[in-house]
Amino acid sequence: MNDTTASVQTTDDLALLEAVTSAVTEAGNVLLDRFSTENRVDGLDALLTAIGGNDDASAAVLRPALERLRPQARWDDDEEGHGALGPGEWWVADAAEGNVNHIHGGVNWGVTATLVRDDVPVVTAVFLPALGQTFTAVRGRGAFLNGSRVSVSTKSDLRAALVGTGQAKPGEERDVLRRTSASIGRMLDAALLVSVTVPATLQLVQVAAGHTDAFWQFGQVRSGLVAGALLVQEAQGAVIDSMGAPWTLTSDDFIATTPGLAADIAAVLR
């Protein structure tokens, strides 16, 4: 792609962002109407029913809106999928990111939509209705919270860092669980404070905004990482794997942090 083509594409992506933001906002308001701090479930069957209800209600708004915006883009149907998508454009969305938090009356949930082009996230919008926050980014144009530019923290000392991780999905593979457990122990020795929570996107937007300093994960679920990866990159952060190489959809693990912490965190996780 030459410079002229890249410039035109970026202009198109900027125009697309407004409509993507509207789509996630509309879907998020559907979830907000279904939300109550009194929500509780009494077992797995009730939990799965509530999860499905939220997913269906939000997706019924989100998916048609995105498909109208980009008819040529394919849809990533596997919410727990990992690895490369392949050439061309793809929508990677989560109609109820942090669904389990919503169902339990917590506020850390939302709707995400990311356009991935040739396996690179290029446009994203994340709407967190209960927090009143909308995060947006276009590749090469910065990251924003409610229209104001954000940037990662300036931390360079891991001993002063707030870091986090979490499961990518229930029922992770045994090796992923083993690596995650071991990494938490090592990070407890290296960082100031370590949190373990879900979903990934809610932690990644905090890294992008400079409120926390790093997030890592071994489970590589696309829908939980692509939005946050683009936001952190556009907030001048580092998005790498534990070998220090730039993260891609085919990476074995994921780190999002400040440039000053990247090498130290990768070393701990290796």
Image (tube, grey):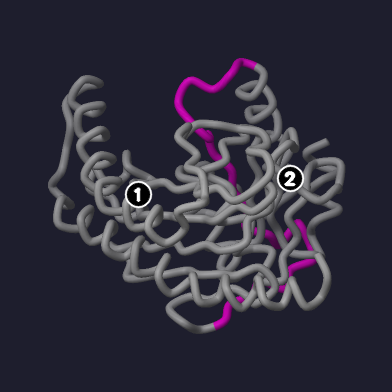
Position of 213 with respect to 245 (left or right) is left
Circle 2 SS class: loop
Number of numbered discs on residues: 2
Relative depth, front residue between 165 and 246: 246
Name the residue at 86% across, 48% down: 244
Q: Circle 2 sits on which residue?
A: 248
Name the residue at 75% across, 47% down: 247
Which secondary structure class fits the magenta region best? loop
Which percent across, then down, holds residue 12? 57, 74
Which percent across, then down, holds residue 168? 53, 35
Q: Circle 1 sits on which residue?
A: 63
Circle 1 SS class: helix
**Residue type, label 1:** Arg
Name the residue at 75% across, 37% down: 251
Which percent across, then down, holds residue 265? 78, 49
Q: Is residue 193 visible?
A: no
Name the residue at 59% across, 43% down: 165
Give the number of the mark in front: 2 or 1. Answer: 1
| Residue 140 painted magenta | no
Q: Which residue lies furthest to the front in this view?
A: 72
Q: What segment is highlighted magenta in the picture?
A: 149-174
Q: Distance between the residues labelled 2 and 1?
A: 25 Å
Dots 2 and 1: beta carbons under 8 Å?
no
Which percent across, then down, holds residue 219? 61, 32
The N terminus sits in image quarter = bottom right
Relative depth, front residue between 2 and 151: 2
